[in-house]
Image (tube, rainbow, N blue to C red):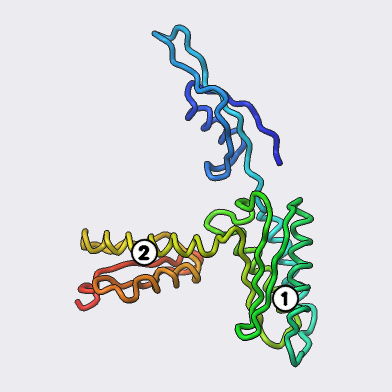
Amino acid sequence: MSDFIRVMGKTVEEAVSEALSRLSCTAEELEYNVVDEGKSGFLGLGSKPAEIEARKKETVSAETVSEVKEEAKAEANAEVKAETSDVLAGDVIAKAEEFLNSIFANMGISAKLESSYDEAEKSVDINIVGDDMGNLIGKRGQTLDSLQYLTSLVVNKNLSEYVRVKLDTENYRARRKETLENLAKNIAYKVKRTKRAVKLEPMNPYERRIIHSALQDDKYVYTKSEGEEPFRHVVVLLKREKRY
C-alpha cells in the first residue's frame, strides 16, 4: 500500500483538490483522512489551514491486466485446441484457481478461493474471500469483470465445450443486481412522471440485461439499447411513444 502524504489547504475541500493534483488521481481513487478541519478566524486573524492525510488507492494495474490478457491470447492462438470428450470439474477448477492465485501473488493480495462446478450449467463458480476486496471489485465491477474474462480464457483453452466462469466476492453480483433493479424502477417512475425518455450510463451486456428484465413487464414504459460498445446504453421510454 502507498504511504499517506500530508496536504494542507484553506479548507478540507481545497486540501483534497491539492491531493488529487499531487497524486494525479481521480476522486474515486483517492483515500484520505481529515487530520484538522482548520478554521477561518476573524478577519483573517487566528486562521488555521485544514490538513488531511491522503494516498491513492491500490488498484489492479490496467497495464498488468492488459499484459496478462495479451499473454493468454498469445498462448491460446499458439496452441492447437485439443479435443476432449468430457469436461472434468477438478481440472477446470484447478486451472482457474492456479491462474487466479498467480495473479493474486503478483498483486500482493491474500485471498481464499471457494470454487464449485455446475455440471448442468457447465459453469465454474468462484467466490473470492479476503480483506479489502473493494479494490478487486473496481469501479462498477470493472476489475472483477476483467479478472473473470481472463480466467475464462485460461479455463477454456483446449476445451471442446465452453465452460462459463463466474467470479464473485463479498456478494457483489447480487448487490449490484439489486442496485440496478432499483435504478430501473426509479428511472421508470421518472419517465412516467416527466413523460420524457431517459438514457442510462453505458453498461456491459450483463447489466443491460438486468435493466431490460426489470422493466419488461411494466405497463407504461419499455427499454431498448443504443450505441456501440463500450458506450452502448439502455434507454427507457414511454410505451405510447412506441405506438406512435
Question: Left of 187 or right of it: where is 104?
Answer: right
Query: Few, some or many C-alpha atoms within 10 Å of disc 2 (few <14, some 14-19, many ≥20)?
Result: many
What amino acid is labelled 2 in the image? Ala
The residue identified by callout 2 is 184
Determine the residue positioned at 73% across, 60% down. 112
The quadrant of the rendering that contains the C terminus is bottom left
Vertical comparison of 102 with 118: above or below: above
Instruction: Tell whether 106 sits left or right of 14.
Output: right
Label 1 Cα neighbours within 10 Å, binned few <14 / some 14-19 / many ≥20 = many
**Residue ID at (47%, 24%):** 11
Query: Which callout, 1 or 2, points at the residue further toward the start of the chain?
Result: 1
Which residue lies at the image location 32% right of the left edge and 67% below the top edge? 236
Q: Give the image location of residue 48, x and y in percent.
A: 51, 14
Identify which residue, 117 or 70, lies in the foreground. 117
Query: Residue 157 at what x, y percent from top left?
Result: 74, 79
Q: Secondary structure at mark 2?
A: helix
Secondary structure of residue under mark 1: helix
Give the spatial CA distance, label 1 vs label 2: 34 Å
Looking at the picture, which amino acid does disc 1 mark? Val
Please give the label number shown on residue 155. 1
